[in-house]
Image (cartoon, coloured by chain):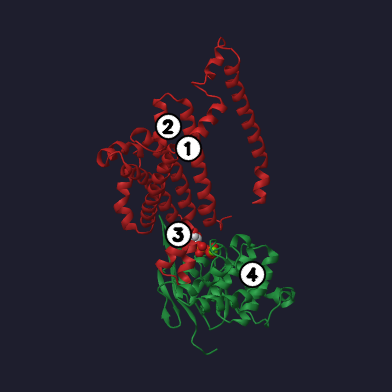
Amino acid sequence: MNLKPKIIVRNLFMSFKQEKEIKVLENINFEISLNEFVSIIGPSGCGKTTLLRIIAGFLKPTKGEVICDGTTVKGPSPSRVVVFQKDAVFPWMSVRQNVEFGLLAKGVSQEERTRISNYFIELVGLKGFEDNLPKTLSGGMRKRVDLARAYAAGPEILLMDEPFGSLDAQTKSKMQEELLKIWEREKRTILFITHDISEALYLSDRVIVLTSRPGKTKKIIKVSLPRPRKNELKFTPEFAELEREVWDLIQEKI
Amino acid sequence: MKKNQSYFAPQIKYGMISLIVGIGIYTLLTNLYLYINVKSIFLLSIFRPQYLPSPQIIWHKMVDLCVGRVIWQNIFISVVRVLLGYICGVTIGISLGLLMGWYKKVDLYIDPLIQILRPIPPLAFVTLFTLWFGIGEISKILIIMQTAAVVTLIPAYQGVKSVASIYIDAARCLGANDKLIFRKIVLPSAMPYIIAGLRIALGLCWAVIVAAEYIASTRGLGFQIIWYQRLMSIDGVIVGIVWLGIIVYVFDTLFRHCIFNPILKWME
Ligand SMILES: Nc1ncnc2c1ncn2[C@@H]1O[C@H](COP(=O)(O)OP(=O)(O)O)[C@@H](O)[C@H]1O
Ligand SMILES: [Mg+2]
């Protein structure tokens, strides 16, 4: 793609000042193109969440910058919606109210809100649960609400921080497949954070491997497995080989 | 709901048993005194009608009073005092608590005042308010207002402070401004705290109004009880207390089922 990149992360440094200065991110550089699916993988505590929060605009980097669509990120914006690691579905709102929240914030009319929320609720497979409260839904279903809510706000970029980290293995692989299906139909630029190698490879066009803290970009791996991808892909030799490669990379220096 | 029922069923059963046995023994003892000449037995002498009237006597008094107008007037007056004071008080308390939780500036200015006011028992102000506003309605409603405001303010404040930051972050990146975040995120998230405060305040307001009516009043259920005390009418006092129990119970149940529970139905 010779288009201008959607996200540019340039010379990014981040450290937290407590009694001692903790360096969390060191000289992070990468670019993500329009509608690309990119994963960031790295050991726990290496600064993945911090990096995502900087790109989302919740945190200011110590040095360097994040550029989205040619402008430097200054704060959160509905053009970059985050799907958090923890359950962030508003428990006091029904599924529909959750999904419509971003539209409500934009001042979209009730009619239009209903139309758009219907579309995304159906897309994530929650038709019939519109009026349910989150407490009546399973963990996987809540993640679907979260996804629909993120999509409905109309972002160009989706930032996902280990969204399936808390799900059981079976629900997790189901959700991965669903996410790809949704993304094939509604292409967005997705930055997906995980510490699960197979998840990263299965979903992404490219995988950015970070070192342990302070996180540095160790390698960027292109995943040229054909799309659309089915779950069975994970059991092919090509996939296993890629998995092995990333595994070795992460093991190299701890 | 169904699960709760089966869970509470044994409690209700045992509760009923001990209630019936208790009332039975009490009835027996008080009637023993009435119908059998056991004045010589010292222990039984406390079951004299002047001290502990039998259930029949209390029931009679209850029916007697229900026929008349006075008890209803006094109940009405107390209910109006509590309701008016409560509604005004919690409105002030909750609004202030929310404002203090949401705006740092407001917190800094108002918190010292609250800290001074908080440890003073509300009843301490009865005398002051009576001197300022007389023995009538204003002083009663003010004392209830003050009670309700102080009791609801702190939970509302804490409710705002304890909103999980993930919800605020989520709302913010979905494009919500401060006003929408306050209305749709902070307020509902603080509701469990606010409602806990509202419930405590309701019970306390009844406690305070009765005491205030004991101390300085010419009307109200509390006044009627103190009036019977002056007349040495023990059955009148007991009937007054029974009425209080009924009213507070009804209030608590109504508020819980009609207001509190529907608001909190989203909770686990
Ligand atoms: N607000 C903060 N203040 C101080 N240290 C922080 C803060 N946020 C994160 N850290 C530290 O930064 C490091 C990276 O955290 P995080 O980005 O959450 O890692 P990951 O998501 O990769 O597990 C951790 O060691 C954590 O202790
Ligand atoms: Mg993390």
Q: Which residue is mark 4?
A: A197
Identity of the amino acid at label 1? Leu
Q: Which mark is residue B244?
A: 1
Chain under callout 1: B
Q: Compared with residue A185, is residue B128 higher up or lower down, i.e. above or below? A: above
Label 4 vs label 3, nearer the camera: 3
Identity of the amino acid at label 4? Ile
- Distance between the Cα atoms at labels 1 and 4? 67 Å
- Which residue is the extreme one toward the top? B40
Identity of the amino acid at label 2? Ile
- Distance between the Cα atoms at labels 2 and 1? 10 Å
What residue do we see at 43% from left, 83% from top?
Answer: A70
Tags 3 and 1 in contact by the CB under 8 Å rule? no
Q: Is residue B106 left or right of residue A121?
A: left
Q: Which residue is mark 3?
A: B187
Label 3 vs label 1, nearer the camera: 1
What residue do we see at 58% from left, 12% from top?
Answer: B38
Along the viewing direction, whichever of B212 and A178 lies nearer the viewer: B212
Within-10-Å neighbours for mark 3: few <14, some 14–19, many 20+: some
Q: Which residue is mark 2?
A: B225
Q: Which chain is red?
A: B
